[in-house]
Image: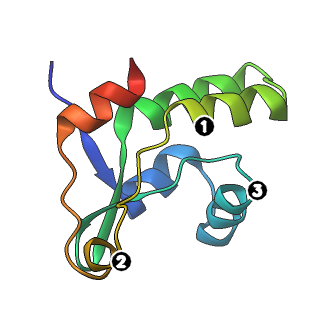
């Protein structure tokens, strides 16, 4: 089973959120942070977005959503040089976070 990465426009379309609302939710811990695909492109794991949508549709509490978001967080690069340059994320890193 492969992991599908979706870009910002597809994430907004699937959730029905506006860009400002999505980033406000990220700031509040109520939506997953994106990870860098390339220097000018970010993405989200499609399965995480689907699970988020299911939780919203079922009326999950904000605490439950925060717990889910923190459980699927993709680790950020540790050093400044990695943050400035191209951040390549391995699918194995995503799988480790989900486990």
Badge number at residue 28: 3
Q: Quadrant of residue 81?
A: bottom left
Residue 43 spot, x, y in % from top left: 34, 56
Considering only vertical position in the picture, is 6 above or below 47?
A: below
> Residue placed at 44% from the left, 52% from the top?
11
Residue 57 in the image, given as x and y percentages of width and height = 70, 25
Where does residue 82 sit, x and y in percent of width and height?
26, 72
Q: Label 1, label 2: how many angstroms apart (C-alpha)?
A: 24 Å
Residue at 22 percent of width and 51 percent of height = 89
Q: Residue 23: which disc?
A: none
Q: Determine which residue is flagged by label 1.
A: 69
Q: CA distance from mark 2 to mark 3?
A: 24 Å
| Residue 92 appears left or right of 57 | left
Q: Which mark is residue 80?
A: 2
Q: Earlier in the sequence, mark 2 or mark 3?
A: 3
Number of the front mark, 1 or 2:
2
First along the sequence among labels 3 and 1: 3
From the image, state whether disc 2 or disc 3 is nearer to you: 2
Side of 97 relative to 19 (left or right): left
Q: Secondary structure at mark 1?
A: helix
């Amino acid at each position: 089973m492969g992991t599908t990465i979706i870009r910002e426009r597809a994430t907004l379309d699937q959730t029905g959120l506006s860009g400002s609302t999505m980033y406000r939710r990220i700031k509040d811990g109520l939506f997953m942070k994106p990870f860098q695909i390339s220097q000018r492109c970010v993405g989200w794991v499609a399965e995480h977005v689907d699970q988020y949508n299911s939780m919203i549709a079922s009326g999950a509490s904000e605490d439950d959503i925060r717990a889910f978001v923190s459980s699927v967080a993709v680790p950020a690069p540790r050093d400044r040089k990695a943050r400035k340059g191209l951040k390549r994320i391995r699918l194995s890193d995503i799988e480790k976070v989900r486990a």
